[in-house]
Amino acid sequence: MPIKNEASIQDEHVRDVRKAIEHRATWFYCLLDEARKRGLGWDDFARKAIFRVGCFHGEQKYTATDDLKAFSGQFPSALSKKVFEMEVAEATPDRYVVEFHYCPLVEAWQKQTDNEADIAHLCDIAMDGDRGIASAFPAFEFDIEKKISEGDPVCRLVYTRKPK
């Protein structure tokens, strides 16, 4: 299914933040592309590095909690909501679902390559950061149900409370 990734929020500050994220995503693509040219598989090193970044942010940026309501107050930030055009699709004590309607990383990767399999792979590696953040919350399970990079209309992140 072809990737559809169109921004609807056109605020100047939001556009500036998106450009910065695109810049970072372009670096990410070029680093991995150069690694591939040298025979290195992306999964051999990039996943561990990005997961490590996520773990760092999960431990440093967020307050530890086993309460999904409390977590939902921390993630996402107001600016992130605008940049990624995020909405909270569900928020209960046992389940928290956030949907991204736009992704500046995918936007950047589409400017570098038309290989949608590579874009989906890059996206999944980048989402190891989200997996790393989630690992800082042992009371939650985390799943990525949909991805813009795979042709879905949204990226859908789902946090569920583990049974006690």
Image (cartoon, grey):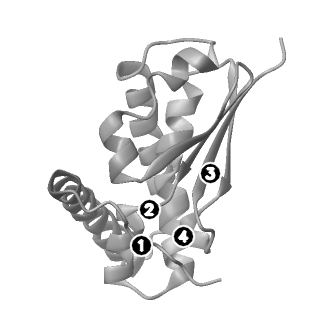
**Viewer-nearest residue: 49 or 145:** 145
Q: Earlier in the sequence, mark 3 or mark 4?
A: 4
Residue sitting at x 40%, y 53%: 84
Q: Percent x, y for residue 118?
A: 51, 77
Q: Nearer the viewer, mark 1 or mark 3?
A: 1
Q: Position of residue 103 (x, y in %)?
A: 42, 61
Q: Nearer the viewer, mark 3 or mark 4?
A: 3
Q: The residue under label 4 is which amino acid type?
A: Ser
Helix, strand or loop at label 2? It is loop
Tell me where residue 40 sits by quadrant: bottom left
Label 4 vs label 2: CA separation? 10 Å
- Give the structural element (helix, strand or loop) at label 4: helix
Question: Residue 152: x, y in percent?
Answer: 63, 69
**Residue that carries the numbered disc 3 in the rendered image:** 156
Q: Nearer the viewer, residue 74 or 22?
A: 74
Q: Are marks 1 and 3 in contact (CB under 8 Å)?
A: no
Query: Is disc 2 in contact with disc 1, using a CB cutoff of under 8 Å?
Result: yes
Secondary structure under the numbered disc 3 in the rendered image = strand
Point out which mark residue 102 bears: 2
Tell me what residue is drawn at x 36 percent, y 20 percent.
60
The amino acid at mark 3 is Arg
Residue highlighted by disc 4: 149
Q: Earlier in the sequence, mark 2 or mark 1?
A: 1
Residue 111 visible to the viewer? yes
Which callout, 4 or 2, points to the residue nearer the camera? 2
Q: Could you tell me how many numbered marks the image carries?
A: 4
Asked if residue 37 lies left or right of residue 140, the reply is left
Q: Earlier in the sequence, mark 1 or mark 4?
A: 1
Task: Identify the residue shown where x is 42% and y is 46%.
Answer: 49
Name the residue beneath numbered marker 1.
Answer: 6
- Compared across the picture, whether 26 is left or right of 12 comes to right
